[in-house]
Amino acid sequence: MTNADQDGWSRVKGRLRVEVGDDVYSSWFARMDLEAIEEGTVRLSVPTRFLKSWIQSHYAERVLACWQAEQPQIVRVELIVRSAVLRSAVVKPKAELEMGSGDNGRFNGNGRPQPAGDATGHEALGGSPLDARLTFDTFVVGRSNTLAQAAAKQVAAAKRGDPVMFNPLYIHAGVGLGKTHLLQAVTWAGNGLGERKVLYLTAEKFMYGFVSALRTQTALAFKEALRGIGVLVIDDLQFLQGKSTQAEFCHTLNALIDAGRQVVIASDRPPADLESLDDRVRSRLAGGLVVEMGPLGEELRFEILKSRVTAARSHHPSFDVPPPVLSYIAKTVTHNGRDLEGALNRLLAHNKLTGHAVTLEMAEREVRDLIRPQEPKRVKIEDIQRVVARQYNVSRSDLLSSRRTANVVRPRQVAMYLAKTLTLRSLPEIGRRFGGRDHTTVLHAVRKIEGLVGNDMALAEEIEILKRQLQE
Ligand code: ADP
Ligand code: MG
């Protein structure tokens, strides 16, 4: 293979990442390697059969299209499973690295401890790697996460035989707002008690474990073992896909809950919005305690930064970040916990490499590209329905009903239009949330309103007002 081939491959990966987003990319494609390019065929390898069949059935066309965008002569993409034995003999550290799933990959290479669930001997039950830094001690509590933290702590401290208070505990929040941190804190704390086995799994690990267990004909053993777990913690549930996996997930969930075992789940959206899961699973998920963690407020960002600096100082005693710099970062780097961490890492690197003290000027220069405009608020479909109903003086149930009188039809169309433009929900999902309507009905409503606002100034104005109310 030539360098040009490798360069092409890097660009294809870049395209894929942009198309599918960071999270999906790191879950499915991070471990894909280029093996060869021969006569219009690209051969790519992945470490597991599961990844192969998953990518083949969900992303084959995308991957090919990305190649063709770079190299039009490519007509075929072939996926193979690379030999684990060969690879791990050659690149040992990488094999370890590859266990990291998704966003947790960033902490690789520093000898992460494994959760206590490892001794079962079954690969599928090993649990995903934990980061030693993600504990309750390092989790800073503020307005947006008080409830989630309290619930998580309660769950972690429960002893065998204690009544289960909320099951499942379901935590949802946008990217970088502390879901993984909280879930791993539960795992560390729970396992520290030595009372009950707490197993932390990313959804991908759950799928991979299950499917490979099926392949090796030990599904029964797998299920039995899963049921022997005290607390099951599943991260990034939004990535759970595929019919058989979902059926198994549903089964496991029911078995654990019915047996009085605790289940803790994190996802980037509320249960009702997990489009690919069926209604029974969704309602089971919503049947415990559902807590949302909001965006990190400025004060919380400041406190997180402060605690990070303190932690960094234990290794780098000369690293000092004056409070005005902390305030500046807390104020301007608004996105999420990951960017805060990134900002501090840059200051630390700069400080270590140049020996210059951290000043406001230096901080302004270093974190410039992390400063982003205020993140738009996550608008919920319920909020849209509530605000629209109030504005047009109808009830929310009118909006969801099948009534077709003019005074209900227009507000309903407006609400659907807003749901499409202000949220990332798909048409079928919006239809479902509007009393189980078909996606074509939603599409019709969206087109209708789009057509009207061009000519009807009053309606355009109304919609602007609604948008402003919802985004404030
Ligand atoms: P998520 O899983 O929701 O995408 P993470 O848990 O990975 O987010 O958090 C991203 C980063 O922000 C991590 O470094 C995490 O430690 C940090 N972080 C988020 N919230 C908090 C908090 N409340 N206290 C301390 N650190 C936090
Ligand atoms: Mg996470």
Image (cartoon, rainbow, N blue to C red):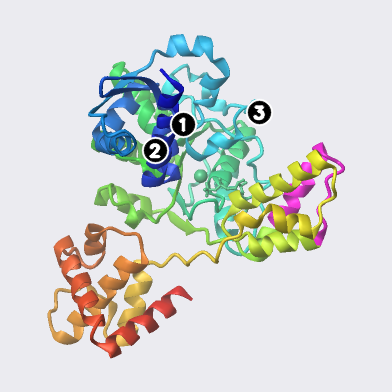
Q: Please name the residue that numbered disc 2 is placed on.
A: 256
Inspect this view and state whether residue 62 appears: yes
Q: Residue at x 81, y 52 (%)?
A: 358
Hey, which residue is sitting farthest right in the picture? 318
Residue type at mark 3 is: Asn
What separation in Å lies between label 1 and label 2 (alpha carbons)? 8 Å
Question: Which SS type dominates the magenta stretch?
Answer: helix
Q: Which residue is drawn at 16% across and 69% down?
A: 444
State the extent of the magenta-drawn residues as a range.
303-323
Residue type at mark 1 is: Ile
On screen, 470 above or below 218? Answer: below
Is 401 contained in the magenta span? Answer: no
Helix, strand or loop at label 1? It is: loop
What separation in Å lies between label 1 and label 3 (alpha carbons)? 28 Å
| Quadrant position of residue 323 | bottom right
| Quadrant position of residue 144 | bottom right
What separation in Å lies between label 2 and label 3 (alpha carbons)? 33 Å
Q: Please name the residue that numbered disc 1 is placed on.
A: 229
Helix, strand or loop at label 2? It is: helix
* Mark toward the start of the polypeptide (2 vs 3): 3
Residue 296: x percent and y percent? 59, 60
Q: Residue at x 29, y 66 (%)?
A: 420
